[in-house]
Image (cartoon, grey):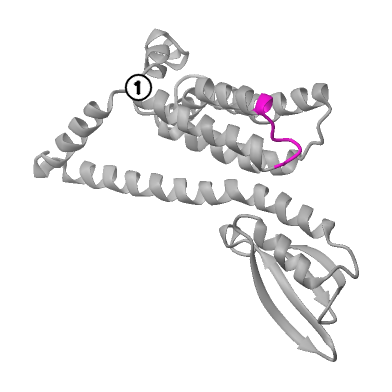
Amino acid sequence: MVQNMLPDRSYIAELRRPWKLASFAIGMAWLLFGALNYGISDWDVGISLLMGGLTYLCAPWSVRVILVSLRFRPKYWLLWIGSAVAVALVVIDGVYYLYHSIVGNEMLRRENFYASSALYFLSGTIWLYRGSLRDFVADFRALRSMPRITGARYKIKIRWIVSALLILMIGGSFAVYPVDHYRISKFCGSIIVNESIEAVRSRALEHSGFRITENYEREGTCSFIIHSPRSFGRFTCFVENDGKAVTKAKFNDFD
């Protein structure tokens, strides 16, 4: 069992699967695009290559060790889970802290921890399957053709697939939160008193994903809210104005 828990030649061979390499390339393309275009202080090309590459190498192992340990309870299974989590923490936070300490970038460790944790375990779940896409289709068809005596097992498999999809969706939304937190808080901090509200609106709409919602007009004071639907309005910039210019801008985190 211990030998099966450690990475071996078959584990390395799985990393060379064309569909896994293709999905890794797509993920890296998005990371590099964000590093070059989003303008976030702790998201650059170097950290994208480091954390992306290490996630591809380590995440499937971490997820597999945790699942096998919970299911079969081998000797020292708690230690194995601790080891898998420790490797994940090194990739998620240790490499991040070391890299930015050397380079001198501003760090957003809490935001990075949320986003990178979700992406690390989501990626590990996606790359956990051992086999080609053809093997996956064959396995799925085999499940459907099982006799009724194995119907309970089939239902368990279906529930597992549905649960995995829900986890992917929820985890993906959590990964979006830190990015929106940074973008909206940074934009809100850039708004100055007496700035034209038309200029603020124009700048806000230049940011991908930002929306403006009118709030109220009372006693000569107007306001509107800048938010992102991707994070379900959790982070907002509340802008008070006199109808022409900004009188106050406040960032809100409904945590």
In the displayed structure, would residue 149 be above or below residue 16?
A: below
Residue identified by numbered label 1: 18
Question: x and y percent of residue 180 in the render?
Answer: 66, 53
**Towards the viewer: 7 or 51:** 51
Magenta segment main secondary structure:
loop
Per the rendered image, the range of residues in magenta is: 39-47
Q: Nearer the viewer, residue 183 or 14?
A: 183
Return the residue found at the far top. Answer: 9
Quarter of the picture containing the N terminus is top left
Q: Position of residue 87 (x, y in %)?
A: 61, 23
Residue 141 location, quadrant: top left
Name the residue: 76% across, 40% down.
108
Residue type pointed to by label 1:
Pro
Left or right, 98 with respect to 172, comes to: right
Q: Is residue 43 magenta?
A: yes
Residue name at image x 65 percent, y 40 percent: 37
Residue 105 at x, y percent in the picture: 81, 31
All told, the count of numbered labels is 1
* Left or right side of 47 for 19: left
Which of the 4 image quadrants contains residue 101?
A: top right
The answer to whether residue 11 is visible is yes
Q: Residue at x 42, y 12 (%)?
A: 12
Looking at the picture, tell me which residue is in the foreground, 242 or 96. 242
Find residue 74 and report its horizontal and vertical position in percent. Answer: 44, 22
Residue 250 vertical placement versus 55 (above, below): below
Split into 4 quadrants, where in the image is the C terminus? bottom right
Inspect the magenta stretch and tell me whether residue 252 lies in it. Answer: no
How crowded is the residue under tag 1: few (<14 C-alpha within 10 Å), some, or many (20+)?
A: few
